[in-house]
Amino acid sequence: MNKKILIVDDDLAILDAISLILIESNYDVRTESSGNQVVEKVITYEPQLILIDVLISGQDGRTICKILKNNDQTKNIPIVMISAHPSAKESSSKFGADDFLSKPFELDDLLSIIEKHIH
Amino acid sequence: MRRLLHYLNPIENLGNRDYTTIFPALGTTLSAVILEIVARYLLKNPESVGLPAIFIFIALIIYFSFRKGIRGGFASAIVTIIYYLYIIFTRNYSGKQLNSGLETTLILAILYCFLATVIGWLKQMIDGLIEREADERKRLQDIIEQLPVGVIIANSQGIIVQSNNQIEKILGISIPIGFKLGSKLLLESKRNGNIFEPADGPLARAVKTGQSTLGEEITITRNDQQKRHLRVSTTAIQNKDADIIAAASIVSDITEQKEVESRKDDFISMASHELKTPLTSMKLYIEALKSQTKKFNDSKVEAITFNIVKQTLRLQKLVDDLLDVSRLQTGKLSFTFEKFLINELLAEVIEMLQVSTNNHKITIKNHEQILIDADRFRIYQVLTNLINNAIKYSPNGTDINIFLEKDQSNLIITVQDFGIGISEDQHEKIFERLYQAADDTEKTFPGFGMGLYISKEIILRHGGKIWVESTKGKGSKFYFSLSLGGEK
Protein backbone atom coordinates (compact mmCIF):
# COMPACT_ATOMS: atom_id res chain seq x y z
CA MET A 1 0.00 0.00 0.00
CA ASN A 2 1.22 3.52 -0.82
CA LYS A 3 2.34 5.81 1.99
CA LYS A 4 -0.26 8.44 2.84
CA ILE A 5 0.54 12.15 2.90
CA LEU A 6 -1.78 15.03 3.80
CA ILE A 7 -0.98 18.49 2.42
CA VAL A 8 -2.49 21.57 4.06
CA ASP A 9 -2.20 24.85 2.18
CA ASP A 10 -4.62 27.55 1.09
CA ASP A 11 -2.83 28.03 -2.22
CA LEU A 12 -4.56 25.65 -4.62
CA ALA A 13 -1.73 25.69 -7.15
CA ILE A 14 0.72 24.51 -4.50
CA LEU A 15 -1.69 21.74 -3.41
CA ASP A 16 -2.15 20.69 -7.02
CA ALA A 17 1.54 20.79 -7.92
CA ILE A 18 2.72 18.92 -4.81
CA SER A 19 -0.02 16.28 -5.28
CA LEU A 20 0.95 15.84 -8.90
CA ILE A 21 4.58 15.25 -8.00
CA LEU A 22 3.89 13.04 -5.01
CA ILE A 23 1.35 10.88 -6.84
CA GLU A 24 3.96 10.52 -9.57
CA SER A 25 6.35 9.34 -6.86
CA ASN A 26 3.77 6.75 -5.74
CA TYR A 27 2.40 8.40 -2.64
CA ASP A 28 -1.23 8.45 -1.68
CA VAL A 29 -2.10 12.14 -1.31
CA ARG A 30 -4.98 14.09 0.21
CA THR A 31 -5.19 17.87 0.32
CA GLU A 32 -6.86 20.28 2.68
CA SER A 33 -7.17 24.01 1.90
CA SER A 34 -8.87 25.15 5.08
CA GLY A 35 -7.29 25.05 8.50
CA ASN A 36 -10.51 24.25 10.33
CA GLN A 37 -11.03 20.63 9.30
CA VAL A 38 -7.45 19.42 9.52
CA VAL A 39 -7.80 17.48 12.77
CA GLU A 40 -10.88 15.52 11.60
CA LYS A 41 -9.20 14.83 8.30
CA VAL A 42 -6.05 13.56 10.01
CA ILE A 43 -8.05 11.24 12.27
CA THR A 44 -10.08 9.73 9.44
CA TYR A 45 -7.31 9.62 6.82
CA GLU A 46 -4.46 8.58 9.14
CA PRO A 47 -1.57 9.94 7.04
CA GLN A 48 2.07 8.95 7.64
CA LEU A 49 3.18 12.54 7.12
CA ILE A 50 1.60 16.01 7.07
CA LEU A 51 2.86 19.00 5.09
CA ILE A 52 1.47 22.30 6.42
CA ASP A 53 2.02 25.84 5.14
CA VAL A 54 2.78 28.29 7.94
CA LEU A 55 0.44 30.98 6.67
CA ILE A 56 -3.02 29.66 6.00
CA SER A 57 -5.96 32.01 5.79
CA GLY A 58 -8.32 31.24 8.63
CA GLN A 59 -5.81 29.61 10.91
CA ASP A 60 -2.07 29.82 11.40
CA GLY A 61 -0.30 26.62 10.26
CA ARG A 62 1.69 26.66 13.48
CA THR A 63 -1.49 26.59 15.57
CA ILE A 64 -2.74 23.58 13.61
CA CYS A 65 0.63 21.93 14.20
CA LYS A 66 0.37 22.55 17.93
CA ILE A 67 -3.16 21.15 18.08
CA LEU A 68 -2.09 17.99 16.24
CA LYS A 69 0.94 17.55 18.48
CA ASN A 70 -1.23 17.89 21.60
CA ASN A 71 -3.73 15.29 20.41
CA ASP A 72 -2.90 11.72 21.49
CA GLN A 73 -4.32 10.29 18.26
CA THR A 74 -2.23 12.48 15.99
CA LYS A 75 0.87 13.47 17.98
CA ASN A 76 3.14 10.80 16.48
CA ILE A 77 2.57 11.80 12.85
CA PRO A 78 5.59 13.75 11.53
CA ILE A 79 4.77 17.32 10.46
CA VAL A 80 6.79 19.33 7.92
CA MET A 81 6.07 23.04 7.87
CA ILE A 82 6.44 25.02 4.64
CA SER A 83 6.95 28.76 4.41
CA ALA A 84 8.37 31.51 2.26
CA HIS A 85 9.71 33.13 5.44
CA PRO A 86 13.01 31.47 6.34
CA SER A 87 12.59 32.98 9.80
CA ALA A 88 9.50 30.81 10.28
CA LYS A 89 11.82 27.83 10.71
CA GLU A 90 12.54 28.53 14.36
CA SER A 91 8.99 29.29 15.33
CA SER A 92 7.81 26.13 13.56
CA SER A 93 9.99 23.91 15.70
CA LYS A 94 8.72 25.72 18.77
CA PHE A 95 5.21 24.68 17.80
CA GLY A 96 6.29 21.06 17.53
CA ALA A 97 7.00 20.69 13.79
CA ASP A 98 9.44 17.89 12.93
CA ASP A 99 10.97 19.60 9.93
CA PHE A 100 10.88 22.74 7.81
CA LEU A 101 10.93 23.40 4.07
CA SER A 102 11.56 26.89 2.78
CA LYS A 103 9.80 28.13 -0.35
CA PRO A 104 10.73 27.94 -3.17
CA PHE A 105 12.14 24.45 -2.71
CA GLU A 106 13.60 21.96 -5.14
CA LEU A 107 11.75 18.76 -5.89
CA ASP A 108 14.67 16.76 -4.49
CA ASP A 109 14.46 18.64 -1.19
CA LEU A 110 10.77 17.81 -0.92
CA LEU A 111 11.25 14.14 -1.72
CA SER A 112 14.24 13.66 0.56
CA ILE A 113 12.54 15.37 3.50
CA ILE A 114 9.50 13.09 3.03
CA GLU A 115 11.64 9.97 2.82
CA LYS A 116 13.52 11.05 5.94
CA HIS A 117 10.30 10.96 7.96
CA ILE A 118 8.48 8.04 6.35
CA HIS A 119 10.44 4.86 6.74
CA MET B 1 33.07 104.27 24.31
CA ARG B 2 29.61 104.70 22.92
CA ARG B 3 28.16 105.06 26.40
CA LEU B 4 30.77 107.63 27.35
CA LEU B 5 30.02 109.69 24.25
CA HIS B 6 26.36 109.41 25.02
CA TYR B 7 26.85 111.08 28.39
CA LEU B 8 29.25 113.66 27.05
CA ASN B 9 26.89 114.47 24.24
CA PRO B 10 25.56 117.93 24.90
CA ILE B 11 22.16 117.19 23.45
CA GLU B 12 19.81 114.30 23.20
CA ASN B 13 18.56 113.15 19.87
CA LEU B 14 15.10 114.56 19.51
CA GLY B 15 13.18 112.25 17.29
CA ASN B 16 15.20 111.62 14.21
CA ARG B 17 16.71 115.03 14.05
CA ASP B 18 20.02 115.70 15.70
CA TYR B 19 20.29 119.01 17.47
CA THR B 20 23.68 118.13 18.70
CA THR B 21 25.82 121.11 18.07
CA ILE B 22 24.52 124.58 17.64
CA PHE B 23 21.84 125.08 20.31
CA PRO B 24 23.84 124.18 23.42
CA ALA B 25 26.72 126.25 22.12
CA LEU B 26 24.43 129.22 21.67
CA GLY B 27 22.86 128.50 25.04
CA THR B 28 26.23 128.38 26.71
CA THR B 29 27.43 131.60 25.15
CA LEU B 30 24.21 133.42 25.88
CA SER B 31 24.00 132.26 29.47
CA ALA B 32 27.66 133.10 30.01
CA VAL B 33 27.18 136.63 28.67
CA ILE B 34 24.02 137.19 30.73
CA LEU B 35 25.64 135.77 33.85
CA GLU B 36 28.67 137.92 33.31
CA ILE B 37 26.54 141.08 33.02
CA VAL B 38 24.51 140.12 36.07
CA ALA B 39 27.63 139.27 38.04
CA ARG B 40 29.22 142.55 37.09
CA TYR B 41 26.21 144.43 38.27
CA LEU B 42 25.99 142.35 41.41
CA LEU B 43 29.63 142.57 42.30
CA LYS B 44 29.69 146.36 42.09
CA ASN B 45 27.28 146.23 44.91
CA PRO B 46 27.30 142.67 46.08
CA GLU B 47 25.64 143.28 49.43
CA SER B 48 22.49 144.89 47.97
CA VAL B 49 21.50 142.32 45.37
CA GLY B 50 23.28 139.26 46.71
CA LEU B 51 23.68 135.76 45.45
CA PRO B 52 20.00 134.74 45.46
CA ALA B 53 19.43 136.53 42.15
CA ILE B 54 22.21 134.49 40.53
CA PHE B 55 20.74 131.26 41.82
CA ILE B 56 17.28 132.16 40.58
CA PHE B 57 18.72 132.76 37.13
CA ILE B 58 20.63 129.48 37.21
CA ALA B 59 17.51 127.67 38.37
CA LEU B 60 15.63 129.07 35.36
CA ILE B 61 18.27 127.72 32.97
CA ILE B 62 18.18 124.31 34.62
CA TYR B 63 14.40 124.29 34.47
CA PHE B 64 14.28 125.08 30.75
CA SER B 65 17.01 122.59 30.06
CA PHE B 66 15.05 119.79 31.63
CA ARG B 67 11.71 120.86 30.23
CA LYS B 68 13.02 120.67 26.72
CA GLY B 69 14.79 117.52 27.50
CA ILE B 70 17.97 119.14 26.48
CA ARG B 71 20.81 117.67 28.37
CA GLY B 72 23.18 120.09 26.66
CA GLY B 73 21.46 123.08 28.20
CA PHE B 74 21.85 121.49 31.57
CA ALA B 75 25.49 120.77 30.93
CA SER B 76 26.07 124.36 29.77
CA ALA B 77 24.45 125.65 32.91
CA ILE B 78 26.61 123.46 35.13
CA VAL B 79 29.82 124.52 33.39
CA THR B 80 28.87 128.18 33.62
CA ILE B 81 27.82 127.89 37.25
CA ILE B 82 31.07 126.18 38.22
CA TYR B 83 33.03 128.87 36.48
CA TYR B 84 31.14 131.69 38.17
CA LEU B 85 31.21 130.05 41.55
CA TYR B 86 34.93 129.77 41.07
CA ILE B 87 35.41 133.46 40.26
CA ILE B 88 32.93 134.64 42.87
CA PHE B 89 34.50 132.74 45.72
CA THR B 90 38.16 132.85 44.86
CA ARG B 91 38.84 136.22 43.32
CA ASN B 92 39.11 139.78 44.33
CA TYR B 93 36.57 141.30 41.97
CA SER B 94 37.61 144.34 40.02
CA GLY B 95 36.41 145.57 36.66
CA LYS B 96 39.66 144.50 35.07
CA GLN B 97 39.37 141.00 36.29
CA LEU B 98 35.77 140.91 35.25
CA ASN B 99 36.74 141.92 31.75
CA SER B 100 39.13 139.06 31.59
CA GLY B 101 36.38 136.93 33.11
CA LEU B 102 34.12 137.81 30.20
CA GLU B 103 36.82 136.95 27.73
CA THR B 104 37.46 133.65 29.46
CA THR B 105 33.76 132.91 29.40
CA LEU B 106 33.51 133.59 25.69
CA ILE B 107 36.55 131.44 24.97
CA LEU B 108 35.05 128.67 27.08
CA ALA B 109 31.78 128.98 25.19
CA ILE B 110 33.53 128.75 21.84
CA LEU B 111 35.59 125.79 23.02
CA TYR B 112 32.46 124.13 24.26
CA CYS B 113 30.75 124.80 20.94
CA PHE B 114 33.67 123.23 19.12
CA LEU B 115 33.85 120.28 21.45
CA ALA B 116 30.12 119.69 21.19
CA THR B 117 30.37 119.69 17.43
CA VAL B 118 33.19 117.17 17.41
CA ILE B 119 31.43 114.98 19.94
CA GLY B 120 28.24 115.22 17.90
CA TRP B 121 29.99 114.09 14.75
CA LEU B 122 31.69 111.23 16.53
CA LYS B 123 28.43 110.09 18.02
CA GLN B 124 26.66 110.25 14.68
CA MET B 125 29.43 108.25 13.06
CA ILE B 126 29.41 105.54 15.73
CA ASP B 127 25.63 105.39 15.74
CA GLY B 128 25.75 104.92 11.99
CA LEU B 129 28.22 102.09 12.31
CA ILE B 130 26.23 100.42 15.05
CA GLU B 131 23.06 100.80 13.05
CA ARG B 132 24.68 99.23 10.00
CA GLU B 133 25.90 96.32 12.09
CA ALA B 134 22.44 95.94 13.59
CA ASP B 135 21.00 95.98 10.08
CA GLU B 136 23.37 93.23 8.99
CA ARG B 137 22.51 91.22 12.05
CA LYS B 138 18.82 91.73 11.46
CA ARG B 139 19.15 90.63 7.85
CA LEU B 140 21.03 87.49 8.89
CA GLN B 141 18.36 86.83 11.49
CA ASP B 142 15.64 87.21 8.88
CA ILE B 143 17.42 84.79 6.59
CA ILE B 144 17.87 82.20 9.35
CA GLU B 145 14.28 82.69 10.44
CA GLN B 146 12.95 81.98 6.99
CA LEU B 147 15.17 79.02 6.11
CA PRO B 148 13.16 75.90 5.30
CA VAL B 149 15.22 73.86 7.79
CA GLY B 150 15.51 74.09 11.54
CA VAL B 151 18.51 76.07 12.75
CA ILE B 152 19.83 76.22 16.28
CA ILE B 153 23.03 77.92 17.33
CA ALA B 154 24.78 77.73 20.70
CA ASN B 155 27.76 79.64 22.00
CA SER B 156 30.88 78.11 23.54
CA GLN B 157 29.14 77.83 26.92
CA GLY B 158 26.37 75.75 25.37
CA ILE B 159 23.84 78.54 25.64
CA ILE B 160 21.41 78.89 22.78
CA VAL B 161 21.94 82.21 21.07
CA GLN B 162 19.75 81.71 18.06
CA SER B 163 17.07 79.40 16.75
CA ASN B 164 14.40 79.74 14.13
CA ASN B 165 10.73 79.14 13.68
CA GLN B 166 11.25 75.94 11.78
CA ILE B 167 13.18 74.20 14.58
CA GLU B 168 10.42 75.04 17.03
CA LYS B 169 7.92 73.58 14.60
CA ILE B 170 9.99 70.42 14.22
CA LEU B 171 10.60 69.93 17.93
CA GLY B 172 7.13 71.10 18.93
CA ILE B 173 8.46 73.43 21.63
CA SER B 174 9.59 77.00 21.92
CA ILE B 175 13.27 77.34 22.63
CA PRO B 176 14.04 80.25 24.91
CA ILE B 177 17.11 82.25 23.91
CA GLY B 178 19.60 81.79 26.74
CA PHE B 179 18.52 78.19 27.26
CA LYS B 180 21.42 76.03 28.42
CA LEU B 181 22.00 72.83 26.47
CA GLY B 182 21.92 69.67 28.51
CA SER B 183 18.55 70.22 30.14
CA LYS B 184 15.63 68.14 29.01
CA LEU B 185 13.54 69.66 26.23
CA LEU B 186 11.98 66.51 24.75
CA LEU B 187 10.48 63.33 26.16
CA GLU B 188 13.07 61.10 24.56
CA SER B 189 15.83 61.14 21.94
CA LYS B 190 17.30 58.10 20.24
CA ARG B 191 20.33 57.52 18.09
CA ASN B 192 20.53 54.12 16.32
CA GLY B 193 17.69 52.96 18.53
CA ASN B 194 19.53 53.85 21.77
CA ILE B 195 18.26 56.57 24.07
CA PHE B 196 20.74 59.37 24.68
CA GLU B 197 20.84 62.12 27.27
CA PRO B 198 20.37 65.79 26.29
CA ALA B 199 24.01 66.43 27.25
CA ASP B 200 24.98 63.98 24.53
CA GLY B 201 22.87 65.64 21.82
CA PRO B 202 24.59 66.64 18.59
CA LEU B 203 24.81 70.34 19.43
CA ALA B 204 25.94 69.81 23.03
CA ARG B 205 28.55 67.36 21.80
CA ALA B 206 29.81 69.77 19.14
CA VAL B 207 30.19 72.52 21.76
CA LYS B 208 32.03 70.16 24.10
CA THR B 209 34.27 68.26 21.71
CA GLY B 210 34.25 70.20 18.46
CA GLN B 211 32.90 67.09 16.75
CA SER B 212 30.97 67.85 13.59
CA THR B 213 28.44 65.43 12.12
CA LEU B 214 26.84 65.27 8.73
CA GLY B 215 23.35 63.89 8.25
CA GLU B 216 23.11 62.10 11.58
CA GLU B 217 19.71 60.44 12.01
CA ILE B 218 17.90 60.88 15.29
CA THR B 219 14.47 59.81 16.47
CA ILE B 220 12.73 61.98 19.00
CA THR B 221 9.56 61.72 21.01
CA ARG B 222 8.11 65.19 21.36
CA ASN B 223 6.28 66.43 24.40
CA ASP B 224 3.01 65.89 22.54
CA GLN B 225 4.00 62.17 22.23
CA GLN B 226 4.65 62.49 18.50
CA LYS B 227 7.59 60.50 17.18
CA ARG B 228 9.68 62.25 14.55
CA HIS B 229 12.71 61.21 12.55
CA LEU B 230 15.25 63.97 12.16
CA ARG B 231 18.35 64.40 10.09
CA VAL B 232 20.82 66.62 11.91
CA SER B 233 24.03 68.15 10.59
CA THR B 234 26.11 69.90 13.19
CA THR B 235 29.28 71.89 12.95
CA ALA B 236 31.51 73.39 15.59
CA ILE B 237 32.63 76.89 14.66
CA GLN B 238 36.22 77.64 15.61
CA ASN B 239 38.27 80.80 15.64
CA LYS B 240 41.75 80.94 14.15
CA ASP B 241 43.25 79.56 17.37
CA ALA B 242 40.97 76.52 17.00
CA ASP B 243 38.94 77.43 20.07
CA ILE B 244 35.31 76.49 19.75
CA ILE B 245 33.35 79.73 19.73
CA ALA B 246 29.96 78.36 18.73
CA ALA B 247 28.18 75.38 17.26
CA ALA B 248 25.27 75.22 14.85
CA SER B 249 22.85 72.45 13.95
CA ILE B 250 20.70 72.24 10.88
CA VAL B 251 17.74 69.97 11.38
CA SER B 252 15.30 68.56 8.87
CA ASP B 253 12.28 66.45 9.61
CA ILE B 254 12.50 63.24 7.55
CA THR B 255 9.59 61.43 9.19
CA GLU B 256 7.51 61.23 6.03
CA GLN B 257 10.47 60.17 3.95
CA LYS B 258 11.21 57.43 6.50
CA GLU B 259 7.62 56.23 6.39
CA VAL B 260 7.69 56.01 2.62
CA GLU B 261 10.99 54.12 2.80
CA SER B 262 9.65 51.70 5.35
CA ARG B 263 6.47 51.16 3.31
CA LYS B 264 8.63 50.52 0.27
CA ASP B 265 10.75 47.99 2.19
CA ASP B 266 7.63 46.32 3.54
CA PHE B 267 6.26 46.18 0.04
CA ILE B 268 9.41 44.60 -1.38
CA SER B 269 9.45 42.05 1.41
CA MET B 270 5.77 41.22 1.00
CA ALA B 271 5.97 41.15 -2.78
CA SER B 272 8.89 38.77 -2.79
CA HIS B 273 7.14 36.44 -0.35
CA GLU B 274 4.05 36.53 -2.51
CA LEU B 275 6.18 35.78 -5.56
CA LYS B 276 7.75 32.78 -3.87
CA THR B 277 4.53 30.78 -3.63
CA PRO B 278 3.70 30.72 -7.36
CA LEU B 279 7.40 30.17 -8.02
CA THR B 280 7.27 27.07 -5.85
CA SER B 281 4.33 25.58 -7.69
CA MET B 282 5.88 26.55 -11.04
CA LYS B 283 9.01 24.63 -10.17
CA LEU B 284 7.02 21.60 -9.12
CA TYR B 285 4.94 21.72 -12.30
CA ILE B 286 8.15 21.98 -14.31
CA GLU B 287 9.46 18.85 -12.60
CA ALA B 288 6.22 17.07 -13.48
CA LEU B 289 6.50 18.38 -17.02
CA LYS B 290 10.08 17.15 -17.28
CA SER B 291 9.15 13.61 -16.34
CA GLN B 292 6.27 13.75 -18.84
CA THR B 293 8.44 15.02 -21.70
CA LYS B 294 10.85 12.15 -21.14
CA LYS B 295 8.04 9.80 -22.06
CA PHE B 296 7.53 11.54 -25.43
CA ASN B 297 11.25 11.61 -26.19
CA ASP B 298 10.83 14.79 -28.24
CA SER B 299 13.97 16.92 -28.34
CA LYS B 300 12.08 20.10 -29.22
CA VAL B 301 9.82 19.78 -26.18
CA GLU B 302 12.87 19.02 -24.03
CA ALA B 303 14.66 22.15 -25.28
CA ILE B 304 11.62 24.27 -24.47
CA THR B 305 11.35 22.71 -21.03
CA PHE B 306 15.05 23.43 -20.46
CA ASN B 307 14.47 27.09 -21.28
CA ILE B 308 11.50 27.26 -18.94
CA VAL B 309 13.71 25.86 -16.18
CA LYS B 310 16.43 28.41 -16.93
CA GLN B 311 14.02 31.35 -16.88
CA THR B 312 12.37 30.11 -13.71
CA LEU B 313 15.77 29.96 -12.03
CA ARG B 314 16.46 33.51 -13.19
CA LEU B 315 13.15 34.63 -11.75
CA GLN B 316 13.97 32.87 -8.51
CA LYS B 317 17.34 34.60 -8.33
CA LEU B 318 15.65 37.99 -8.74
CA VAL B 319 13.11 37.21 -6.04
CA ASP B 320 15.88 36.02 -3.72
CA ASP B 321 17.91 39.18 -4.39
CA LEU B 322 14.89 41.39 -3.77
CA LEU B 323 14.26 39.67 -0.49
CA ASP B 324 17.92 39.92 0.50
CA VAL B 325 17.94 43.64 -0.27
CA SER B 326 14.84 44.15 1.82
CA ARG B 327 16.37 42.13 4.67
CA LEU B 328 19.57 44.15 4.46
CA GLN B 329 17.53 47.35 4.63
CA THR B 330 15.73 46.21 7.73
CA GLY B 331 18.80 44.60 9.28
CA LYS B 332 17.18 41.17 9.23
CA LEU B 333 19.75 39.32 7.13
CA SER B 334 21.25 36.73 9.45
CA PHE B 335 24.50 34.83 9.08
CA THR B 336 25.54 31.33 10.10
CA PHE B 337 29.29 30.95 10.37
CA GLU B 338 31.01 27.66 9.74
CA LYS B 339 34.48 26.50 8.76
CA PHE B 340 34.90 25.29 5.19
CA LEU B 341 37.40 25.09 2.37
CA ILE B 342 36.99 28.05 0.05
CA ASN B 343 38.49 26.03 -2.83
CA GLU B 344 35.68 23.51 -2.68
CA LEU B 345 33.04 26.20 -2.65
CA LEU B 346 34.72 27.97 -5.55
CA ALA B 347 34.88 24.75 -7.57
CA GLU B 348 31.17 24.23 -6.94
CA VAL B 349 30.32 27.76 -8.15
CA ILE B 350 32.50 27.46 -11.22
CA GLU B 351 31.03 24.11 -12.14
CA MET B 352 27.53 25.55 -11.96
CA LEU B 353 28.34 28.75 -13.88
CA GLN B 354 30.56 27.19 -16.54
CA VAL B 355 27.50 25.28 -17.77
CA SER B 356 25.68 28.56 -18.42
CA THR B 357 28.26 29.85 -20.90
CA ASN B 358 30.06 28.39 -23.87
CA ASN B 359 32.02 31.56 -24.64
CA HIS B 360 33.92 31.97 -21.39
CA LYS B 361 36.53 29.87 -19.73
CA ILE B 362 36.52 30.18 -15.95
CA THR B 363 39.82 29.19 -14.32
CA ILE B 364 41.15 29.10 -10.77
CA LYS B 365 44.78 30.20 -10.80
CA ASN B 366 45.68 28.78 -7.41
CA HIS B 367 44.70 25.44 -5.92
CA GLU B 368 45.97 25.83 -2.39
CA GLN B 369 43.54 24.56 0.22
CA ILE B 370 42.34 27.47 2.35
CA LEU B 371 40.05 27.03 5.33
CA ILE B 372 37.85 29.96 6.22
CA ASP B 373 35.22 30.72 8.85
CA ALA B 374 32.26 32.35 7.12
CA ASP B 375 28.65 31.92 6.06
CA ARG B 376 29.04 29.35 3.30
CA PHE B 377 25.79 30.18 1.50
CA ARG B 378 26.44 33.93 1.58
CA ILE B 379 30.00 33.58 0.26
CA TYR B 380 28.58 31.29 -2.42
CA GLN B 381 26.23 34.16 -3.28
CA VAL B 382 29.10 36.67 -3.50
CA LEU B 383 31.19 34.40 -5.72
CA THR B 384 28.18 33.66 -7.94
CA ASN B 385 27.44 37.38 -8.27
CA LEU B 386 31.02 38.33 -9.13
CA ILE B 387 31.56 35.52 -11.63
CA ASN B 388 28.12 36.05 -13.16
CA ASN B 389 28.96 39.73 -13.61
CA ALA B 390 32.29 38.81 -15.18
CA ILE B 391 30.37 36.68 -17.70
CA LYS B 392 27.65 39.25 -18.23
CA TYR B 393 29.99 42.20 -18.75
CA SER B 394 32.35 40.46 -21.15
CA PRO B 395 29.88 39.75 -23.94
CA ASN B 396 32.65 39.06 -26.41
CA GLY B 397 33.72 36.11 -24.37
CA THR B 398 37.20 35.58 -23.03
CA ASP B 399 38.92 34.20 -19.99
CA ILE B 400 37.68 34.71 -16.49
CA ASN B 401 40.45 34.20 -13.94
CA ILE B 402 40.08 33.63 -10.25
CA PHE B 403 42.98 34.20 -7.88
CA LEU B 404 43.22 33.15 -4.25
CA GLU B 405 45.89 34.92 -2.24
CA LYS B 406 46.49 35.10 1.45
CA ASP B 407 48.65 37.04 3.85
CA GLN B 408 48.97 36.48 7.63
CA SER B 409 45.43 37.37 8.45
CA ASN B 410 43.40 37.76 5.26
CA LEU B 411 42.31 35.86 2.24
CA ILE B 412 41.91 37.92 -0.91
CA ILE B 413 39.87 36.56 -3.77
CA THR B 414 40.09 38.21 -7.17
CA VAL B 415 37.73 37.72 -10.08
CA GLN B 416 39.26 39.04 -13.28
CA ASP B 417 37.53 39.54 -16.60
CA PHE B 418 38.54 41.14 -19.89
CA GLY B 419 35.19 42.70 -20.70
CA ILE B 420 33.79 46.21 -21.05
CA GLY B 421 35.36 47.53 -17.83
CA ILE B 422 34.12 50.30 -15.57
CA SER B 423 35.16 53.94 -15.73
CA GLU B 424 36.81 55.29 -12.62
CA ASP B 425 33.92 57.53 -11.58
CA GLN B 426 31.71 54.47 -11.21
CA HIS B 427 34.06 52.37 -9.07
CA GLU B 428 32.29 53.32 -5.86
CA LYS B 429 28.80 53.75 -7.24
CA ILE B 430 28.46 50.22 -8.59
CA PHE B 431 28.31 48.93 -5.00
CA GLU B 432 25.35 51.15 -4.19
CA ARG B 433 21.83 49.82 -4.01
CA LEU B 434 20.05 49.61 -7.38
CA TYR B 435 22.93 51.23 -9.24
CA GLN B 436 23.78 49.75 -12.58
CA ALA B 437 26.75 50.40 -14.82
CA ALA B 438 26.02 51.29 -18.41
CA ASP B 439 28.35 50.85 -21.37
CA ASP B 440 29.37 53.51 -23.90
CA THR B 441 26.08 53.54 -25.70
CA GLU B 442 24.27 53.75 -22.34
CA LYS B 443 22.77 50.38 -23.06
CA THR B 444 22.17 48.73 -19.74
CA PHE B 445 22.54 45.07 -19.07
CA PRO B 446 19.66 43.03 -17.71
CA GLY B 447 19.32 42.89 -13.95
CA PHE B 448 18.25 45.05 -11.04
CA GLY B 449 21.61 46.32 -9.83
CA MET B 450 21.29 44.41 -6.59
CA GLY B 451 24.08 41.85 -6.87
CA LEU B 452 27.07 44.01 -5.99
CA TYR B 453 25.16 45.82 -3.27
CA ILE B 454 24.24 42.50 -1.65
CA SER B 455 27.82 41.23 -2.10
CA LYS B 456 29.26 44.35 -0.50
CA GLU B 457 26.92 44.09 2.49
CA ILE B 458 27.71 40.40 2.93
CA ILE B 459 31.46 41.02 2.85
CA LEU B 460 31.16 43.99 5.21
CA ARG B 461 29.22 41.87 7.69
CA HIS B 462 32.07 39.37 7.55
CA GLY B 463 34.44 42.18 8.49
CA GLY B 464 36.00 42.13 5.03
CA LYS B 465 36.35 44.59 2.18
CA ILE B 466 35.28 44.56 -1.45
CA TRP B 467 36.65 46.78 -4.21
CA VAL B 468 37.31 47.01 -7.91
CA GLU B 469 40.20 47.91 -10.17
CA SER B 470 39.13 48.54 -13.71
CA THR B 471 39.86 50.48 -16.85
CA LYS B 472 37.09 51.17 -19.30
CA GLY B 473 37.34 48.82 -22.24
CA LYS B 474 40.04 46.67 -20.67
CA GLY B 475 38.16 44.54 -18.19
CA SER B 476 37.83 44.56 -14.42
CA LYS B 477 39.33 42.96 -11.34
CA PHE B 478 36.96 42.57 -8.43
CA TYR B 479 38.59 41.86 -5.07
CA PHE B 480 37.20 40.87 -1.73
CA SER B 481 38.95 40.03 1.49
CA LEU B 482 37.92 37.75 4.33
CA SER B 483 39.69 37.28 7.62
CA LEU B 484 41.28 33.85 8.02
CA GLY B 485 39.54 33.03 11.28
CA GLY B 486 39.79 29.30 10.63
CA GLU B 487 43.57 29.17 10.67
CA LYS B 488 44.28 31.05 13.86
Image (cartoon, rainbow, N blue to C red):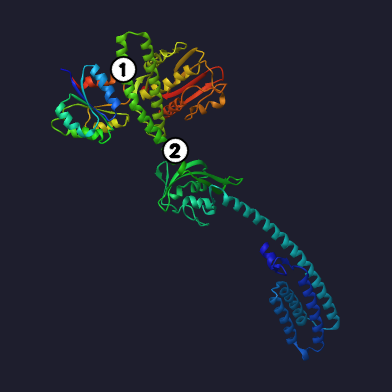
**SS class of the residue under badge 2?**
helix
Q: Chain of mark 2?
A: B
> What number is the disc on residue B254?
none
Q: Residue at x 21, y 16 (%)?
A: A26
Tell me the residue that label 1 is attached to. Answer: B287
Rendering quarter of residue B26:
bottom right
The kind of residue on which mark 1 rests is Glu
Examine the rendered structure and indicate whether residue A37 appears above or below residue B374: below
Task: Report x, y in % for residue A55.
Answer: 28, 33
Q: Residue at x 50, y 53 (%)?
A: B168
Of circles 2 and 1, which is in front? 1
> What number is the disc on residue B261?
2
Structural crowding at the residue carrying mark 2, measured as other residues with C-alpha within 10 Å and reported as few (<14), some (14–19) or many (≥20): few
> Left or right: B161 with respect to B256?
right
Task: Report x, y in % for residue B305.
Answer: 36, 14
Q: Earlier in the sequence, mark 2 or mark 1?
A: 2
User: In which quadrant will I find the N terminus of chain B?
Assistant: bottom right
Task: Report x, y in % for residue A28.
Answer: 19, 20
Rendering quarter of residue B255:
top left
> In this orientation, does residue B438 appear?
yes
Q: Residue at x 21, y 19 (%)?
A: A27
